[in-house]
Amino acid sequence: MHKRARSWGNWLAPAIILLILGAGVASFAGPGQSQGDKHSLKNDVSELKSRAGTGRLVAEQALAGNLTRNFVEAQAEQMRKGVAQTRDKLTPEQFGPELSAQVLQAADLARRLEGALNSLRGAGADRQAAESARKNLAGLFEELSRLEEDLKE
Amino acid sequence: MKNIVELFLGILTAMGGFVEVGELVFSVDAGAKFGFRLLWVVALGTLGITVFCEMAGRVAAVKGQPVFNLIRERAGLNAGLVTLVAANLVNLLTCTAEIGGIALVWQLLSGWPYRWLALGALGFLLLVVWVLSFQWIERVFGLLGLLMCTYLAAAYYLRPNWGEVAAGFVPGVPHLESSSEYLLFAYFAVAILSSVMLPYETYFYASGAMEDGWNPGDVNLNRVIAIVGSVLGSVLAVALVVCGAQVFRPHQIEPQLPGEAALAASLTLGRWGLLAAVGGMFFAFAGAAIETSLSGAYNLAQFLGWPWGKYRPARTAARFSLTWIITFVLAALIIMTGVDPVSVVEYSIVFSVVILPFTYFPVLVIAGDRRVMGEEHANGWFANAVGWFYLGIVTLAALLAVPLLIVTRGGKG
């Protein structure tokens, strides 16, 4: 058994190094480094739509009295940061010229989504502000859904 | 009576310590993306982690040797060293993800700035591991991690179609719209398998058996804890998938943050449900952070033959103690650079699956060696067959993980 174990020891080291190097290269050079295409723009829009949907859910739960003020503020801020990261990627240079119009539309929706999440964050105990944020987020969810459908075609 | 209490505590702590941030994020997201169709992968992974934890615990109890002693002894210095470096890098990455998760959860409770909370988490973890004994660490974080059972209650009150839930345990691939969705399904299958079978769990379990002073008389205790604890723990993972499917799928939300998962609890159980879920996540993530840092220290000390163990005073196991302290500090520093904690979670899961075969192979070889383990305690033909089957599964998953990460653009589809 020892001999067998030593023999697999011979291939184990290079195998691990290869797999780890492969994973490392993939992590840094794989996703997100090449110029975006329609599919990756659709993914970005889906992510924004998902944030808008969560924001709406948070607003609904806040209005129902199920969430604490700190939770609403922190959750809205964590989501806003994610939206800002996605928005930074949404420049026409990152995508082909044929997608410029949709990229600009997505970037605009991302900016509005950031604003809506900021409003939700600041709503605190103000039910009217929370309701307004909920409506705003629901509207953005619909707009982002339409853009996502356009990009699927 | 003492044995029954130990068994009960062992099962509960194994259950409470089962879920960590990667499993939470991927399970809820998998439910949101694919409904119940990935539940069979949770079951597959649960059986796998049960098999290998039982073997590692049995070897520790019978031979008094934890995993990395075996790896060095059997694989030789070079291959062992590479495995050690890879395993500890993955441990560091997982610890980083857990500290990021703690900071996010604390932010949900306090609203304070994320980086300061990451620093606070570092201080908290250092203090806890320094002050508490191994047994108390296990009990506090394992038992309070049971607050995660809130998700069980949430899953129940969300009234899923139980027939569809049961159908999800039948292995299969659903009919999807495009090839990219099939690839995404495969990526999530690999990620869920990895999150259930994280390698640090085996290192920690075997080293913990030695911390608890197990001997050959504890082989049955080991078996019951490994089986029942893992199965009950996986019920929590199933509940997370159900919550994802019931709450987020209808709203077309793909949750990525711990706070989003907590919404499933608030929706069904109100504010107290929310607080219990957030508390459960804190104890689960903190427990996992401690396990990964201690695993790193166990691995290094066992490989290099240093004195190790929480049961020793820090001055007699100084290099061991320094290693877990450095692991915590490095992990916190990585988080404080501003790196996206969700990305760290994803990479920790993918890198973990890559080293799974190298973790489990030596355990399987030793546990099946009758000259080492004796006739009474060596694997029987069934345990060997199941072990080799799982080694094949995790090797396949390790080979697919990186290509799937690339083609799905980091799991985005």
Image (tube, coloured by chain):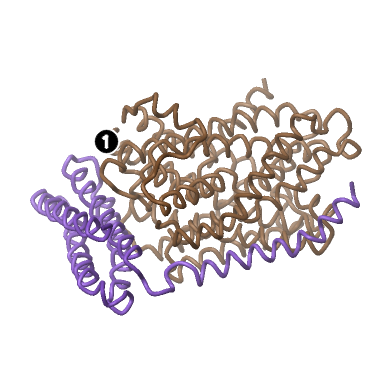
Chain colours: A purple, B brown
Q: In this rendered view, identify the residue nearer to me: B277 or B82.
A: B82
- Residue sitting farthest toward the bottom: A93
- Residue sitting farthest toward the top: B1
Q: In this rendered view, identify the residue nearer to me: A142 or B240.
A: A142
Chain holding disc 1: B
- Give residue B9's quadrant in the image: top right
Residue with the mark numbered 1: B270
* Residue A140 horizontal/vertical position (percent): 17, 57
Q: Determine whether B237 is above or below B351 in the image.
A: above
Circle 1: is it few (<14), some (14-19), or many (20+) Cα within 10 Å? Answer: some
Q: Is residue B218 left or right of residue B123?
A: right
Q: Is residue A6 left or right of residue A72?
A: right
Say which residue appears at 55% left-offset and 44% top-offset: B193
- Residue sitting farthest toward the left: A128
* Residue B333 horizontal/vertical position (percent): 51, 68
State which quarter of the image contains the C terminus of chain A: bottom left
Q: Amino acid at mark 1?
A: Gly
* Residue B200 horizontal/vertical position (percent): 63, 50
Residue B285 visible:
no
Residue B37 visible:
yes
Q: Determine whether A21 is above or below A150 in the image.
A: below
Say which residue appears at 32% left-offset and 74% top-offset: A95
- Give residue A101's quadrant in the image: bottom left
* Residue B245 horizontal/vertical position (percent): 35, 38
Say which residue appears at 56% left-offset and 70% top-offset: A25
Report how many numbered discs are placed on residues in the image.
1
Q: In this rendered view, identify the residue nearer to me: A73 or B75.
A: B75
Element type at marker 1? helix
Q: Determine whether B124 is above or below A40 in the image.
A: above
Q: In this rendered view, identify the residue nearer to me: A55 or B142.
A: A55
Q: Is residue A74 left or right of residue B241?
A: left
Q: Determine whether B194 is above or below B44 in the image.
A: below
